[in-house]
Image: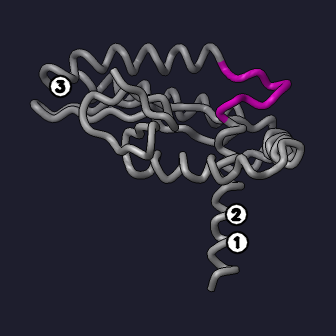
Amino acid sequence: MAKCSYCGTGILFGGKRTGEQRFCNTACQQRGALIALSLQVPDPVVAKNVWDVHQGRCPKCKGPGPVDVHTSYKVMSFLVLTRWSNTPYLSCRACGLKQQMSGLAVSLFLGWWGIPWGLIMTPLQIGRNLSAAFSCPDPAKPSPKLEKLVRVNIGAKAARSAAAARA
C-alpha cells in the first residue's frame, strides 16, 4: 500500500502525485510543497523556531508548555457510511490528552454502526488513541511532527513573501 509523502497515511485508491511523491489529498500535496520550500531556510533558523514553539504557551488553553503535536483518532459510522480521521493538534500535553479522549469516546459510541468498515476501523482508532495517550512526545525536546509543522508554517510565510514581492 502506498503512503502519503506528507502525513504517512496509507493510500488505497487514487491520491495526488507530484513527481515521485504521492499524497493522500490536495491539502497534503500543498503542505509537501511548502516543506520543500522551507528546506531553503537554514537549519539553525528552523531549530530556533521549533524550540520557541515548543517552549511557548499552549494555543488551546494558554497555559505553559511544553507544546507539541498530539494526534486524536476518530471513527463514526452510519450503516454503510464510515468516516475516520487522524487530527493533529498543536497543544500542551493536557489539551492533547483531552482531544485524544474525546476521539476515543466518539469512536467508542459512534464507530461500530457501519458494516464492514465501522467494525474494522473502530478497534483500530480506539487502540491508536490509547497508544497516543500513553506514549506522549518527550517533553524535553520537540518531536519530528512539531518540526514538520513549523517547517510548513515557515514555507507558507516564504510563499506569501514571494507572492507579495511579485505583486
Q: Which quadrant of the structure image shows residue 92?
A: top right
The span picked out in magenta is 136-145
- In the rendered structure, the answer to whether residue 156 lies left or right of residue 15 reads right
Q: Which quadrant of the structure image shows residue 131?
A: top right
Disc 1 to disc 2, how far (Cα)?
5 Å
Residue 139 vertical placement versus 32 (above, below): above
Q: Give the residue at mark 3.
A: 113
Residue at (67, 21) in percent of width and height: 136
Q: Give the residue at mark 1.
A: 161
Query: Is 136 in front, or is 32?
Result: 32
Which secondary structure dominates the residues rendered in magenta? loop
Residue 159 vertical placement versus 142 (above, below): below
Residue 160 vertical placement versus 54 (above, below): below
- In the rendered structure, the answer to whether residue 132 lies left or right of residue 136 reads left
Disc 3 to disc 1, how far (Cα)?
48 Å
Residue at (48, 29) in percent of width and height: 8
Q: Give the residue at mark 2.
A: 158
| Contact flag, marks 1 and 2 (Cβ < 8 Å) | yes
Q: Residue furthest bottom?
A: 167
* Mark with earlier residue (3, 2): 3
Q: Which quadrant of the structure image shows residue 9?
A: top left
Q: Secondary structure at mark 2?
A: helix
**Residue density around tag 2, few if under 14, some if 14–19, many if 20 or more, within 10 Å:** some
Q: Secondary structure at mark 1?
A: helix
Instruction: Inspect the magenta stretch and tell me whether residue 34 lies in it.
Output: no
* Mark with earlier residue (3, 1): 3
Q: Position of residue 1 (x, y in %)?
A: 33, 20
**Residue 149 seen in the figure:** yes
Query: Is 34 in front, or is 120?
Result: 34
| Contact flag, marks 3 and 2 (Cβ < 8 Å) | no
Instruction: Inspect the magenta stretch and tell me whether residue 144 lies in it.
Output: yes
